[in-house]
Image (spheres, grey):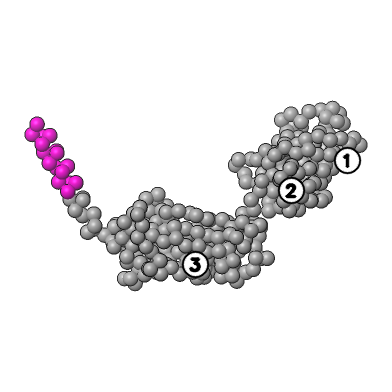
Amino acid sequence: MKMLKYSFGLLATVLVFLSSCRDSVEPNIPYSSFDNGAYLRTIARTSTTFNFFELGASNFALTLEAVDKEDGATVDNVEIRVRHRRLIPGVGLEFTPANDVLVKTLQSTDFQPNDQSRFLRTSFVVTAAEAIAAVGLTAADIEGGDVFEFRLVLNDKLGRSFSTNNVTTNVAGAPFYASPFQYNVSVICPSDLAGTYAFDALETFCGDTFSGSTTWTAVASTAGSYTVSDGTFGAWQSCYPDTWGSGNVRISDACGNLTMSGTDKYGDSYSMTVISSTPEVLTFEWVNTFGEFGTVAVKSNAGKPWPALK
């Protein structure tokens, strides 16, 4: 009993100590240069991609929470900086400009109280147009797969700055802090080609022509990639006959540029060349390394026209 009373008394003492220190102890925020400071907790990533097909309507948008010893009141301003990044095959990464540039500044007055936390919060939006102009490019210069690197710099009223150059891995990556200070915004090309389509086989390696249907199934692990139900689009069945079976051929959509890859059950690989594309009909030629080929006209479904494809 004596031990139980002692344990309870110790627990109560600890709880009183912790509750009394809540607002008097500065948050321990480890930086490479400071033991204490401020950080920007990511509350919501409202928009972190640019749509290549709709750059004019795309933006980068976050909701942030300023955490410091004064519940966010030590923040003087936050710089939002950006640079453009592109991977050049066989060369490496190309940055425009070499160092990031200022695109927008948040003032201390932009951080306001909220009903979910004691810390001040702010939400901001940087349009794709603003980011493109800031790095000295135009919309015509942008390609699918490009990345805009946004870096935040928090300047406090004590003359200190916090950003990627002094943030520790714990602050940047731990879920509690959620303060990476850098956000990579990719230029993506949304693709929605999954479905079952009617087609006409206009030409085959054996001279047959016919009509049929093809099913394109989205590959969950690879955006813009679709397995096709029959890489020969019925040509084997019509010309031999033979069945497609375990073949694995895909059509990939990279910003409207269609390619075909994969092999059939005999190990022969496939490729394609788009002949023409309208909202109603996509016409292309497929070939494989065995020498088989065909030309098919795939019809769009009602209410779902083909997008601009190459």
Q: Which of marks 2 and 3 is nearer the N terminus?
A: 3
Judge left or right: residue 1 versus residue 53.
left
Q: Whole-Å distance between the Cαs marked 1 and 2?
A: 22 Å
Q: Contact (CB < 8 A) between labels 1 and 2?
A: no
Residue 75 position (above or below residue 23)? below
Q: Which amino acid does label 2 sit on?
A: Trp
Judge left or right: residue 93 versus residue 62.
right
Q: Contact (CB < 8 A) between labels 1 and 3?
A: no
Q: Is mark 3 on a helix, strand or loop?
A: strand
Tell me residue 277's x, y (percent): 79, 50
Q: Which residue is at a point 81% across and 34% down the rendered structure image?
A: 212
Q: How crowded is mark 2: few (under 14 residues within 10 Å), some or many (20 or more)?
A: some
Q: What stretch is highlighted in magenta?
A: 1-16
Q: Which of marks 1 and 2 is nearer the N terminus?
A: 1
Q: Residues within 10 Å of mark 1 (few under 14, many from 20)?
A: some
Q: Which residue is at a point 33% across and 58% down the rendered structure image?
A: 119
Residue 32: quadrant of the picture: bottom left
Name the chief secondary structure element in magenta: helix
Judge left or right: residue 197 versus residue 59.
right
Tell me residue 75's x, y (percent): 35, 67
Q: What residue type is labelled 1?
A: Glu
Q: Name the residue under label 1.
A: 203
> Hey, which residue is sitting farthest front in the picture?
303
Q: What residue type is labelled 3?
A: Arg
> Hey, which residue is sitting farthest right in the picture?
207
Q: Whole-Å distance between the Cαs marked 1 and 3?
A: 55 Å
Q: Name the residue under label 3.
A: 81
Q: Name the residue under label 2.
A: 306
